[in-house]
Image (tube, helix red, strand yellow):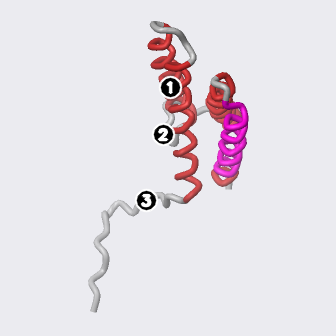
Amino acid sequence: MSAPAPSSGSGARTPRITILDVLRLLTELAAFAILLIWGFVAWPFAWNILFGLLAPALAILAWALFVSPKAVFAVHPFVRVLVELLVFVSATMALWDLGYGWVGLGFGIVAVAVGLLHGRRSLE
């Protein structure tokens, strides 16, 4: 005889994490890392410290304010998509500027595909 599972009493369901959620997190983290590397590598000394810290910080701030699941501002889905695309396009352009154009293009395609699939799922 098995005992019933303890309940929290609140009746709230915990969200199920899917492979799509993991892929979205990985593309976000990759975009922030790309912007960090670009800032430190693409600029001469003194400017590289500023851009190396500022570029990913601005991307993380925009993501936290408008795109994250617990975003500070509840905006129209169109605005969320624009901010998400802005972050991914920035990372793609940073890779292009570093001389990795094809890698940047591949990253952009994967990031946009994951974003589209995740956005489509959230509309259902």
Q: Which residue is mark 2?
A: 70
Whole-angstrom CA distance, mark 3 to mark 2, is 15 Å
Q: Quadrant of residue 18?
A: bottom right
Q: Which mark is residue 36?
A: 1
Q: CA distance from mark 3 to mark 1?
A: 33 Å
Nearer the observer, disc 3 or disc 1?
1
As helix, strand or loop, the secondary structure at mark 1 comes to helix
Tell me the SS state at disc 3: loop
The correct choice, above or below, for 28 with respect to 90 in the image is below
Q: Residue at x 72, y 36 (%)?
A: 102
N-terminal label among 3 and 1? 3
Q: Residue at x 63, y 24 (%)?
A: 98
Residue kind at label 3, given as amino acid type: Thr
Residue 71 seen in render: yes
Q: Residues within 10 Å of mark 2 (few under 14, many from 20)?
A: few
The chief SS type of the magenta part is helix
Q: Quadrant of the C terminus?
A: bottom right
- The residue under the point 61% across, 32% down is 75
Q: Is residue 98 left or right of residue 49?
A: right
Q: Amino acid at mark 2?
A: Lys
Q: In the rendered image, which residue does mark 3 sit on?
A: 14
Where are the magenta residues, as a range? 100-119
Earlier-in-chain disc, 3 versus 2: 3
